[in-house]
Image: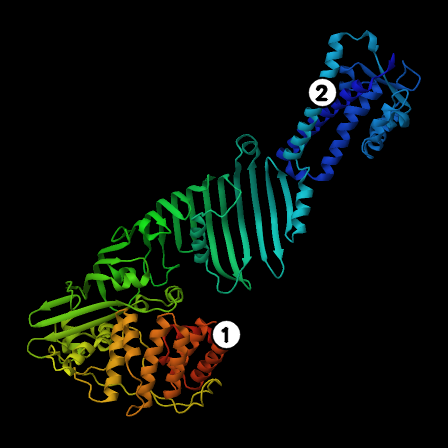
Amino acid sequence: MQPASISSRFAAMNLDMIIFGALWQALSIGIEKTAPEFATPGILLGLCFIVSILYFVYPTKASGQTIGKKLLNLKVVPKGQPKGTVSWGQAILREVVGKWVSSIPFFLGYIWAYFHPDRRTWHDSMGGTEVLSLVWEEEKTTAQKVQQIFLAIISIPAGVALITVAFLYTSLPLDSIKEKIEASGIQVGELSGSLAGGLRFENISRNDAGQKFNVSSLDVKFNLWALLTDNVFYIEKITAEEGHIEVPADFSLMVIFANLLAVAQFQDSGTNVRNLTMAKFHLKNIYFEHNKKVLSHLQEFSVKNLAVADKELYVNEMNFQIVGFLVKAVDVRSSFGRVEIGKATGGVTPEFLPMLKAPVDFHVNGTIAKNPKNTKIEAGLVIDKIKINYAAEKLTAQVDQLTLNEMFKMSVPVDELNMKLTSQGTTVMDMLSTLQVEYGVKVCGQEFKPDAEKGPSLARADRQFNFRMMPLPVLDFGQVVFAKEATLDDLFGYELHGTKQIAPAFASTQEMISDLCFQKPVASLQPTEVESLKPLEKVVQSGKSGGSLATMLAAAAGKKAEPVVAEEPTKEETPPATAPVAAVPAASPAVVAATSPTPTPTPGTSPTPEVAKVPTTPAELMKTVVSEAKNLMKQGKFAEAKVLLEAAPVITEGVTPAELGSFYNMKAWVYLYSSNPEQAAQNFESAFNARKDIGDAEGLLRSYEALKKDQDAQKWWDYIKSAVKANPGLKNQLTPNMQRKLASEVSAESPQ
C-alpha cells in the first residue's frame, strides 16, 4: 500500500461531506417540522456533533474507512502500521479536534498535504495517522481512474448544492437575519422557520422618537424557485396579526384607503421591480393609537393574487374593512395613472357614519383616469335606489323613492326623495355652475311634485306649498360628516313656504304646517302632534325671505317688477342679554359691550321678511346686498356672491356698527369658502372691530387655521373659550361645529 493521492482524498472528503450534510439536514428539518420548539441553535449544534461522531469517528475507529473513503479504496491507519487499527483517542483527535484545526486557517491544514512527502495533513499528524490507498496507482484500471475523477468533479457542485439547501431550508441563517433586523432598531422576540419554507416573526416592536409599534406575529414566505426559473419575485404570503401603531392625533384610516387608491394608479416611477407576484397579503386587527387611545381599528386588509408585469398591476381580489365600513374589489387593473375596477361592493353602517340610521350598501365599477375625458364610472347605493353615472365629463344621478327619514338622522320629516341631477365639467366649480336638479319629495306623507322654478310644490284646494332642500357650504366636510352628533341637517338646509288664494299667507306658521301634515286646525291637534310640528316650524321661520336683488334693481331702473307676495312677519325674538366678554387678542382693539350677533351664513338663515322695495338709502342698499349675498350662498353660488360683495361700496355713514360688521362678515365668509383665507381674515377683523361679535372671532380662528398661523389661531381660540366662560349664552352664537369643538375640549379638561 502507498499514501493516497491528493485527488482521491479530495474526492473522498467531498463525498463524506455531502452524505454527512444530507443526514444532518434531514434530521434538523424533521425536528423543525415535527417539534419546532426543540429546533434551537444549541440543540441543532448538539445534533451536529452526535452525527459527526456516528459518521466520522466510529467508522474510522472500526475499519479506518468512512463511506467516501470506502468508495475510493482509502483507509486510515496508525502511522507506520499499514495493517493496524486506530484507537478511540486517535479517531476523536483526528476527526473532531484535528479537522477543526486544519479548517480554521483557510483550510491550510488540508493544503499542507500537497507539500508533505507522505501527503499527511495536520489532522493526520495530530492523530498519529496516515491515509493509504488499498490499490496501487499503477494497478488502477481505467474505469477506477475515471470513477475517481468523476467523483472528485461531481462532489464540488453537489457540496455547493447541499450547502445552499441547508442555508435555505434550515434555521441556520436566522440568527444573522435577526441580528441585522435588530440593528435597524426593530426588536424581534422570536424568529423561526427558514428562507425557503417561510419565516415567522413573533413580538416585533419598535419604540423610539421616530416610530412606535408592535405586532404580535408576522409570517413571510417566498417562492425562490419562481425567482430562479421564471425571473418572477413570487411572494406566497405575508400575514400580520394583532398590531398596535402609534399615529398622530388627526390620523384617519380613510387617508390610508385614499393612499391605497393613489398607489393603485401605479404610475411609472422608474422602479426596477418588473415582475412581481403575491399570492396572499393579509393584515388583521391592526390598531392605530395616539397616546394609548385607539383612533382607528383596521379589522382586515387583504389582497389575493396580485401581479405586476410590464409596469401593469393586477389584483384579483382586495378586501378593506374597518369598523362600520367594508369594501371588496375584484379584477382591479392599473397602469400609468389609469385604474380599471371590475366590480367593487361594500357597505357603510352608523358606526362609521353617525348620521345614518341604517346600513347602506354600494357598488362601483368602471375606469378612473388622470384625464377626466377617459373616466367612466357607474355606481349604485341602497339597492340601486341611488344610481350615479359619470362619462365623457358628464355626471348624471337618479334617486328613486329614497326613504330619507328611515336612512338618516334629520329633524325634518322628509319621508321620500326622488331626484334627477345632471352636471358637466372636470372641476367642482365647473360642475356646480352647470348643475341642473329636478326633484320631488314627500313631507308628512304629502307628495311635492318637481317644479323647475319654485322647487317641489304641492297644491291642495286653495292652498299652495313649496319645499326646497339645498346643500350647505361646509368648510371641513370630514369633521362635519364624522362627528358623533352629525345629522343630515349639517349638510342640507330646508325651506318650506305656504300660501292661500284668499289671503296672501297663512294666519300662522302652525296653521300652515297643521294643514300640511294633519289637514285639520291647530286647535284640534293633540300635544304629541303639536310637538312634531316644531322641526318644520324652524324650517318655515328660516325660509322666509323678501324679493331678490334683481327685482329691486329692476324697480330702481323704472321697470315693472314682478309682484311679490309677502308673508306675515313673525314675532321677532328678544336678543340675548348683554354680558361681559373676555379680553380680545392683542391684534384687535379692546372689547366693548357684546352686541346681538349677525348669523353666520349657513343655510337655514335668511333676511327678515319684508315686501320687495327699492333701496333708497345707503344703509338699505348695504342691507340689500348682504341679503342677496346670503341667498346666493344658500344656493352654492359663491362666485356670484363674491362678485356682488366686491362690487358694492363700503358705506360707513348712516349705518350702524352692527350693519357694517354684518357686511364685512358676509364678505369674509365668501372669501373663506372661495379658498382665500388671507382676505377672509382681513374682513373678519374689520367686522370684529366694528361690532365685537363672537361669530367674527370664530371666523378669524378658521382663517388663521387655514393660513397655518398657529399662534394667531390659538389667540382667537383662547378668546372664544374665555368669552363663552364669561357669558355661556354666547355659545349659541357659534356654529354647530365650533360648539362641538368647544364642548369636546371642556370635557377633556374636566376632571375624570
Name which quarter of the figure residue 445 lies in: bottom left
Q: Give the crowd class for mark 2: few <14, some 14-19, many >=20 residues within 10 Å.
A: some
Q: Which residue is mark 2?
A: 153
Q: Nearer the viewer, residue 191 or 440?
A: 440
On screen, residue 417 versus residue 208, left or right, reads: left
Q: Which mark is residue 143?
A: none
Against 294, is 510 above or below?
A: below
Any part of residue 194 in sight: yes
* Residue at horizontal 17 percent and vertical 65 percent from the top: 456
Element type where label 1 sits in the image: helix
Q: Amino acid at mark 1?
A: Asp
* Residue at horizontal 69 percent and vertical 39 percent from the top: 40
Q: Position of residue 325 (x, y in %)?
A: 39, 54
Element type where label 2 sits in the image: helix
Q: Nearer the viewer, residue 127 or 432?
A: 432
Q: Which mark is residue 710?
A: 1
Q: For the residues marked 1 and 2, what is the alpha-carbon distance in whole angstroms?
A: 75 Å
Q: From this viewpoint, which residue is outermost toward the right?
A: 80
Q: Position of residue 127 (x, y in %)?
A: 89, 26
Q: Nearer the viewer, residue 384 or 606?
A: 606
Q: Quadrant of the N terminus?
A: top right
Q: Amino acid at mark 2?
A: Ile
* Of the image marks 1 and 2, the number of the one nearer the N terminus: 2
Against 173, is 622 above or below?
A: below
On screen, residue 391 versus residue 591, left or right, reads: left
Against 121, is 150 above or below?
A: above
Q: Give the crowd class for mark 1: few <14, some 14-19, many >=20 residues within 10 Å.
A: few
